[in-house]
Amino acid sequence: MIKRGLPPVHPGEILREEYIKERSLTITEVAKGLGIARANLSAIVNERAGISPELAVKLSEAFGNTAQFWVNLQKNYELWHAERKVNRALIQHFSQPGAGLQST
């Protein structure tokens, strides 16, 4: 469980602010360079879609970092939101195999 109050930044915001704007690029240029539809990249940088593992590989090649960097940003974002969405009190617990058995 991620223990922090503020949500992690959406990976699209990081892509937009730290990689696209910092290099004075356009969404169209980057989408073309990555070989993806402009609409798909726009959805990501406008925080309406996430970064897939395939796109993470493309971004790592384009910007000189690792695919794991992008995957981790997405995973942390999704996990933070999932932790707040799931009601743990409704989940049934299952014991370990053999738990409660006494050896003789």
Image: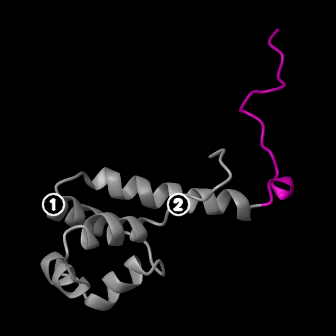
Q: Which residues are magenta?
A: 87-104
Which residue type carries mark 2?
Answer: Tyr
Percent from the top left, x then y, of residue 65?
Answer: 22, 52
Give the residue pinned by disc 1: 61
Give the residue pinned by disc 2: 77
Tell me what residue is drawn at x 31 percent, y 81 percent. 41
Which SS does the magenta portion mostly show? loop
Q: Secondary structure at mark 2?
A: helix
Mark 1 and mark 2: Cα distance apart in space: 22 Å
Tell me what residue is drawn at x 68 percent, y 52 percent. 5
Decide: few, some or many residues near mark 2? Use Cα within 10 Å; few <14, some 14-19, many ≥20.
some
Instruction: Give the numbered dot on residue 28.
Output: none
Q: Secondary structure at mark 1?
A: helix
Quarter of the picture containing the C terminus is top right
Q: Quadrant of residue 27?
A: bottom left
Image label count: 2
> Which of 99 and 51 lies nearest the eye of the viewer?
51
Percent from the top left, x then y, of residue 55?
Answer: 28, 69
Chain-order first, disc 1 or disc 2: 1
The residue furthest top is 104
Q: Quadrant of residue 30?
A: bottom left
> Which of 83 and 27 lies nearest the eye of the viewer?
27
